[in-house]
Amino acid sequence: MLKQSLLGLALATALSTVAHAESVNILMEGVPDTEYVKTLLPEFTKETGIEVNLEVVNYAEMHTKLVPQLVAPKGSYSAIVVDFYWVGEFTKAGWLMPLDDRIKADGFDASVYVPKLMDLVGQVDGVTYMLPFYNYAMGLLYRTDLLADEANKAAYLEETGEELGPPKTWGEYLQQVKFFTKGDMHGVVNQGLRPDPIAMEWSNYLFANGGEYHDADWHSTLNTPAGVAALDQYKANVEEYGPLGAASFSFDEAFNVMAQGGAYSYITYNFFRAAIDDPSQSTVAGKVEIMPVPGQEPGVGASLNGAWGWAIPKSSPNPDAAWTFLKWVESHDIAKKRALQGGSPTRLDVFDDADVNAKYPYTGAMKDMLLTSHNFPVFTYTPQLVEVLGRELSLAVAGEASSADALAAVETEMNELAKKDGKLK
Amino acid sequence: MSQPSTMEAADRRFGWFMSAPGLALLLAVILFPVFWALFTSVHEFTLIAPNFDTFTGIENYAAALGDPAFRHSLGLTAFFVGAVVLIEFAIGFLVALMLNGVERFKPIYYGILLCPLLMNPVIVGLIWRMFLHPSLGIVNYLLTVAGFEPVNWLGSTKMAIWTIIMVDIWHQVSFMIVLLLAGLSSLPKEPYEAARVDGASVFQSFFFITLPLMMPVIIVTLLIRMIFAVKTYDLIYIMTRGGPGVATDLVSYAIYRTAFVSLNIGEASAMSAILLAVILIFTGYLYRYMRTLT
């Protein structure tokens, strides 16, 4: 009887050990790249014995769910994903664990990442807090069938004296937008909803005109000829060359117009390149290509960069297991498997991988977009800047403020935020 | 004489004893957050530095009231609340009066009417955003089929707030109908019979019997709906994010932005306290008015 009891006790102990196998909890956004990670998780559990629980929510919920966990001495998330918007806030608040010692100890090669992505969602003031997860740089989607059309070519040559082809400069692109606006066809569709859709899209216009958000001392440089020209062009595109209501479009509505063949071009996030080839949601599958937003000169890119990074919060209940997961998910093999499913790479060796390029021929264009892209200002108050920028741009597009007045208002508030953050002396 | 009063006192004590746990819970979940918000509103409390180390006095209140964007949001919210409450009341009372006379299929009408009310505001916003898409939405399609010009529902500064009002009415009008119908059903029949005997017309019965008897119900209904309308946030978040420009920037959305985008919980709490004060003053006025009626 005693033997049986002891055996039972031993079995129960063994079973409870199995039941309490280590697990990693991660809060993630419901996006395709999260789905690609999800499909590979059984491999990780098989290799390490660590279970991974993904809590997938929409973007709007992420920040409000994260902050209480990050403030707590011990939170429930082992690892998190961080949008570039929050990098300044999270690092300033001291919520993220520096990863340099772990990277060094395990010989993890962080030099394989696109340098601009490491600047955006990797390092802050020389300390590595994140590993870039996926990028959502913006590019120019354009209709290849319209460019190849002989009648269009002849008409464009007659009208402008130039050959019709993918635009090499920003000026050429604006000329094409005007040219293709005829009848029900629009030269461009914009995402004018405030705050982030319009703020992110307009940033490409700013860079394309040779503008920047601030100088080396963090003085805002928006109310400049480049900034005003960018906003005037944006307004013209919304009002004269875009579909009705573009001033209130979010990216999904603007994408739908593009996918239903209603526009020649759309400056948007790179993940829409794969979506536009999906016949279930697009009538122009196979007729659209992506390229870096052209700048003032040929070869100069004006795309806005955007990305998410993996991080381990200081409140992580099990940072060692979280690091084991980060190393695995960001290893070359797993990053390549994610890219082959349609994921958006951050590692140069995945961008250059033959299999990835064979499956997705536009991978080279995506890489060019990143290499020539520009970063949005990353500081503690990035979300507020986006909010202010979105509000003022929207006022200008609505005709309730002139471009110069709107940009002057953004400049004033941006300088105040930069001062508050200690960036502007 | 002392026997019943002792019993009454014992009954009262027992009543308090039984209600105490519920009341304590109610105080904890209602009063504690209110006091916490008021305490936060006089401190520099941000999500980056969530502590009460710096007492700021009325600074957060001054910052909120000095901000033209917040004042614009307050004014716009007053307009929005006035519009939705009055229009919903007019439609709601009319439908309730019509339904009050209906004898057959009442549950079916109730079911249909309650459908929008049962829907989550986020879903309502998403559905209407899809319907009102200027070039791909069904509303503009039907308008163009009927020979009208397509309407820029959410992209025009003049139209956007009316679009939000229209969607809110669609979503919330059944709330008015249900409450007013409940009030109408409970009215006594005798005054109407007497009026009929005296030869009163339908309009006379309505203005001299129905309206005065319904006044307390109407005021409570308007009050509840007004408080709900002030809190409108979901529709704005989903449909316009306060735009185009600042055309739909209602106060609840402005407070949300201050708290969760600017991370300034102190100022957001001050804004909420200002809003609470405005609502309390208005509620107090309506409550006193209702007391004079009853």
Image (cartoon, coloured by chain):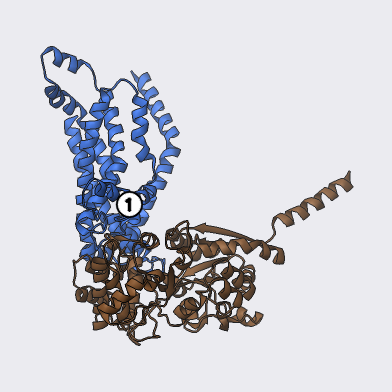
Chain colours: A brown, B blue
Q: Is residue A1 left or right of residue B246?
A: right
Q: Looking at the image, how many numbered discs can be counted on the residues?
A: 1
Q: A176 or B84, which is in the foreground?
A: A176
Tell me if residue A273 comes above or below residue B194 in the rendering. below
Tell me which residue sits at (46%, 80%) in the image.
A368
Q: A224 or B20, which is in the foreground?
A: A224
Q: Which quarter of the figure is the N terminus of chain A placed in?
A: top right
Can residue A23 be seen? Answer: no
Q: B224 or B37, which is in the foreground?
A: B224
Tell me which residue sits at (41%, 74%) in the image.
A139
Indicate the chain on which mark 1 is placed: B
Q: Which quarter of the figure is the C terminus of chain A placed in?
A: bottom left
Q: A129 or A11, which is in the foreground?
A: A129
The location of residue A397, given as percent across then percent down, is 24, 67
Q: Is residue B203 left or right of residue A334?
A: left
Residue at disc 1, secondary structure: loop
The location of residue A115, given as percent across then percent down, is 50, 83
Q: Amino acid at mark 1?
A: Gly
Q: Which residue is mark 1?
A: B137
